Amino acid sequence: FLPAAYKDPDSFLKSARLQRLPSSSSEMGSQDVSPLQETSKDPFSGDCSCRQDGLTVIITACLTFATGVTVALIMQIYFGDPQLFHHGAVVTDAARCTALGTHVLARRGSSVDAAIASALCSGIVNPHTSGLGGGGVMLVHDIRKNRSWVIDFREVAPLGIPLEGDLQQDTKPGLLVGVPGMIQGMHQAHQLHGRLPWSELLGLTAGVAHNGFNVTHDLAKALSELKDLNYSERFHEIFLPDGQPPLPGTFVRRPDLAAVLQLLGAEGVSAFYSGNLTQEMISEVHSYGGVLVEEDFSNYSVTVEDPVHTIYRGHLVFTPPPPHAGPALITALNILEGFNITRQGSRGDILHWMAE
């Protein structure tokens, strides 16, 4: 039996002298036995190293998981399957070309793919406003990188163009022909932002020329104004059959243009700027007094640059830099921002401000 003072187990343990037990035969033979040290620390308190180790493991695991998820998302954005949007828009001046651009988007093409197909289609359906012999400028915004680019592929003057005189008054129409930039500009845009194969895009566009299209009202009107001018026999054969312009809605096929587009799709831009097609264009231009040479085509290059921008009523507006009209648009918007065009003045005043 324990004395009354030791009936409380806690009191007994506190008063007892604890000693370290020997763990080996050598220690058992030793008479120097060191007592165990009594401690008042709670093993589950915050100062315990075991709790600190546990928190370290938990924090490390959370950070590792968060880092892994972040890396996976970045990899998915830049290298994963393309994002598909349920809403989009394609706008052109011809229903056939708008439908073609929408079709390209439905085939999981990028917005630039749709723009390329639609623009080349416009050169087929409305050749009086666009075409392979022209040029242009494209403003592209990459939603993933949140960055914008301007691709400038405007026509340039030939090296041999006269520096003096009025070209508009000159009787040689060949002098009005510049170095085309359309194909190289479209190809550059595709290299940077395209998704579908180049040959597929030009094949779809060639299908419009090969399968045929209906003459638009704009094209019929433009051709009616040109019927009395002295154009080549080839022009009359294509656009003025029987000496009369086609009526709106007339069904037309362009197998010659389809063949050119198929060639460019198969061989790339080199077929346009350094091939037999180049020689044909130079020969045709020279027959009308032009000065285009092979060096003009081989020296042509596309410019990729940053756009200029402004903030108009809280909206960020991007436009092409000079020599394009972008800065003029920015100036006009900056002036308009000083007017409350939604509430001040009559409709006539608002239109007057916008026109100025």
Image: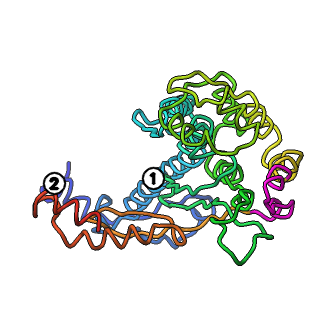
Disc 1, SS: helix
What residue sits 39% from the left and 67% below the top? 329
Q: Is residue 277 above or below residue 298?
A: above
The x, y position of residue 84, in whole percent, is 48, 35
The x, y position of residue 304, in whole percent, is 62, 64
Q: Are marks 2 and 1 in contact (CB under 8 Å)?
A: no
What separation in Å lies between label 2 and label 1 (alpha carbons)? 52 Å
Q: Is residue 285 magenta?
A: yes
Query: In the visual, does 263 lie left or right of 183?
Result: right
Please tell me which residue lies in front, 175 or 195.
175
Query: In the visual, does 230 lie left or right of 69?
Result: right
Q: What is the three-letter code of the residue carrying label 1?
A: Ala
Q: Mark 2 — residue?
A: 8
Q: Is residue 10 magenta?
A: no
Q: Is residue 165 above or below residue 200?
A: below
Q: Quadrant of residue 313?
A: bottom left
What residue sits 20% from the left and 73% below the top? 338
Return the mark for residue 66: 1
Query: In the visual, does 137 lie left or right of 241?
Result: left
Q: Residues within 10 Å of mark 1 (few under 14, many from 20)?
A: few
What residue sits 48% from the left and 40% below the top? 92
